[in-house]
Image: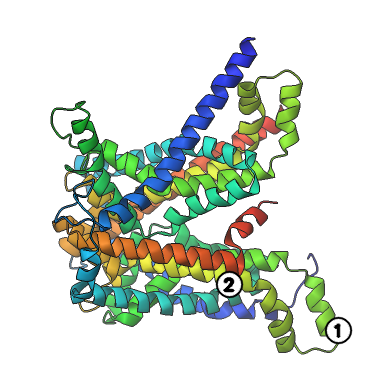
């Protein structure tokens, strides 16, 4: 693998490279350029759009809410997926296949369909409300749809597979003897989990956190349908400013700020995990 | 004694949360299938009685059938382009450690990190500036960019499992490059191409952000049509469409499992 290869080896990648250059790199450069115009009619270069964003409490709030949503969903998914992954690796082949199917099916089913299911569950006449009313626990239907809690719950379920798969992968890679050794040496199961399993599967957990965070923060369909019109988050804000108001420079700046925020947080979590695992090696 | 108790609490908590996760994973699919068989006019749960009327209704709804057909066509073209361009790129890059290869690989993967909305808006702006009218083709182009990473990842994994000695042997025994590709490389990476193609197809069929920006007024795709319906009213026909999608996805999953061992490929990538 370390032998130098002739440059012709890269030739099969050339067609895709050209497509990406024209339809991916060039547009992103254009996006940056357009965000630097002061008016929607593309007049006068200035950082006005970015200053406008920074000076507008509403815009800042939308960004903060979107980031918070992503983080909350990622943490909820982590709490749910760890036990699921632990049960997976402790099971026999039949249950394993069943669980993988159960995880893959929602992942591959259309997002609109999964979101629709949550409308049925959380709606006014939905499952939760009719169950609570018929059990006499609630006097009147609660407003679950168009609420923050409902949105976090729905997104957690919708993105759960993205957390479960990398966790299962890194648990499978873990030598099961390590946890058994820890227990054999007198550590309780809780301690074996905290001191052995958790640190060694941290890369999988981090990978899952990053995937779920990015997916939840950008989930336009679920955000608009479950969150409703009153919860405004970055994706619908960008949509509204571009296709609605047609303020292209501001929409371009919003997309870039949002992209920077998502990638920045992904990089920060990644760096944090590297520091944590390095600390582990040193210990 | 105390350790025994904490062990039992640990197992109980892990078991309970895992059970909740399983229920949570399963529930929405079941809910969709159940509500799609309601006889009622609303999404009231549980349904007052059972009926297939909403499925029958679908066949009389060209406003849903046309977008479904459009989505199918977009997804097929996207899968074709992603599979061909992505497999070729994966073959070139998967075993190449050179700097330029790593750079290209990072570039091809970046649509997965970049919010699709930002990318779609940027492509729309470029089309506007240079005067390209939106069409079916612009839509497929946008879809291909966001779907090709799946093919590259899965074909790349297959290429890395391929023993390079097999190719060297074939070549040194006098087989041509094309013959070697057709008879040695292709059969060995087929599973990766099938799995990557399936995921690319499904994610194109499901894509909203790209279609939101890059579809012209005449090209309406299914997920956006469904989204628009759900934003306005709670039409029970959406339940029937969802039922069809769930069943088709299930069939696709079973096919992928029997053809390519989808669940096995997840197990394998880990060992």
In the rendered structure, find residue B193 and report the number of the disc placed on it. Answer: 2
Q: Chain of mark 2?
A: B
Q: Which residue is mark 1?
A: B172
Q: Is residue B109 left or right of residue B122?
A: right
Quadrant hosting residue B244 = bottom left
Distance from disc 2 to disc 1, alpha carbons, whole Å, reads 26 Å
Q: Is residue B150 left or right of residue A61?
A: right
Q: Is residue B75 left or right of residue A137?
A: right
Which x, y percent locates residue A21? 47, 74
Q: Is the residue B264 above or below the residue A165 in the image?
A: below
Q: Chain of mark 1?
A: B
Which x, y percent locates residue B206? 36, 64
Q: Is the residue A42 above or below the residue A232 in the image?
A: below
Q: Residue at x 66, y 25 (%)?
A: A192
Q: Is residue B16 visible?
A: yes
Pick the front one: B229 or B238: B238
Q: Secondary structure at mark 2?
A: helix
Q: Is the residue A254 above or below the residue B151 in the image?
A: above
């Amino acid at each position: 693998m370390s032998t130098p290869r002739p440059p012709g080896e890269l030739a099969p990648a050339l067609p895709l490279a050209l497509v990406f250059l024209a339809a991916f790199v060039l547009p992103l450069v254009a996006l940056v350029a357009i965000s630097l115009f002061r008016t929607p009619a593309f007049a006068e270069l200035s950082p006005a759009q970015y200053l406008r964003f920074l000076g507008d409490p509403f815009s800042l709030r939308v960004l903060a809410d979107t980031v918070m949503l992503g983080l909350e969903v990622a943490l909820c998914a982590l709490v749910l997926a760890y036990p699921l992954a632990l049960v997976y690796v402790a099971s026999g082949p039949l249950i394993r296949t069943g669980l993988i199917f159960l995880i893959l099916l929602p992942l591959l089913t259309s997002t609109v369909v999964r979101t629709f299911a949550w409308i049925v569950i959380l709606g006014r006449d939905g499952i939760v409300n009719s169950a609570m009313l018929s059990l006499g626990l609630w006097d009147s239907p609660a407003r679950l749809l168009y609420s923050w809690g409902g949105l976090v719950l729905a997104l957690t379920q919708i993105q759960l597979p993205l957390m479960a798969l990398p966790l299962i992968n890194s648990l499978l890679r873990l030598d099961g003897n390590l946890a058994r050794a820890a227990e054999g040496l007198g550590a309780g199961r809780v301690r074996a989990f905290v001191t052995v399993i958790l640190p060694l599967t941290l890369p999988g957990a981090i990978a899952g956190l990053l995937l779920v965070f990015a997916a939840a923060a950008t989930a336009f369909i679920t955000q608009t349908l479950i969150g409703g019109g009153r919860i405004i988050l970055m994706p619908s804000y960008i949509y509204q400013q571009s296709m609605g108001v047609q303020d292209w420079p501001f929409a371009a700046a919003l997309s870039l700020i949002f992209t920077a925020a998502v990638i920045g947080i992904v990089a920060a979590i990644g760096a944090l995990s590297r520091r944590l695992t390095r600390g582990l090696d040193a210990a | 004694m105390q350790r025994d108790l904490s062990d039992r609490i640990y197992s109980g908590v892990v078991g309970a949360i895992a059970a909740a996760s399983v229920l949570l994973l399963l529930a929405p699919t079941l809910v969709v299938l159940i509500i799609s068989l309601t006889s009622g006019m609303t999404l009231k749960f549980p349904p007052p009685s059972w009926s297939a009327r909403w499925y029958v209704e679908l066949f009389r709804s060209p406003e849903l059938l046309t977008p479904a057909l459009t989505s199918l066509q977009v997804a097929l073209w996207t899968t074709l382009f992603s599979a061909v361009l992505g497999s070729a790129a994966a073959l070139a890059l998967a075993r190449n450690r050179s700097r330029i290869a790593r750079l290209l690989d990072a570039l091809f993967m970046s649509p997965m990190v970049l919010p699709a909305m930002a990318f779609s808006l940027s492509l729309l702006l470029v089309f506007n500036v240079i005067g390209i009218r939106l069409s079916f083709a612009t839509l497929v182009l946008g879809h291909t960019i966001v779907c090709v990473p799946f093919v590259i990842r899965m074909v790349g994994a297959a290429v890395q499992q391929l023993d390079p000695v097999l190719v060297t042997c074939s070549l040194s025994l006098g087989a041509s490059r094309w013959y070697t590709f057709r008879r040695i490389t292709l059969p060995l990476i087929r599973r990766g191409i099938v799995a990557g193609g399936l995921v690319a197809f499904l994610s194109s069929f499901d894509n909203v952000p790209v279609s939101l920006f890059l579809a012209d007024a005449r090209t309406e795709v299914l997920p956006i049509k469904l989204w628009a319906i759900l934003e306005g009213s709670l039409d029970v026909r959406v339940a029937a469409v969802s039922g069809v999608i769930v069943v088709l996805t299930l069939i696709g999953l079973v096919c992928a499992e029997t053809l390519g061992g989808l669940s096995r490929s997840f197990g394998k990538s880990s060992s």
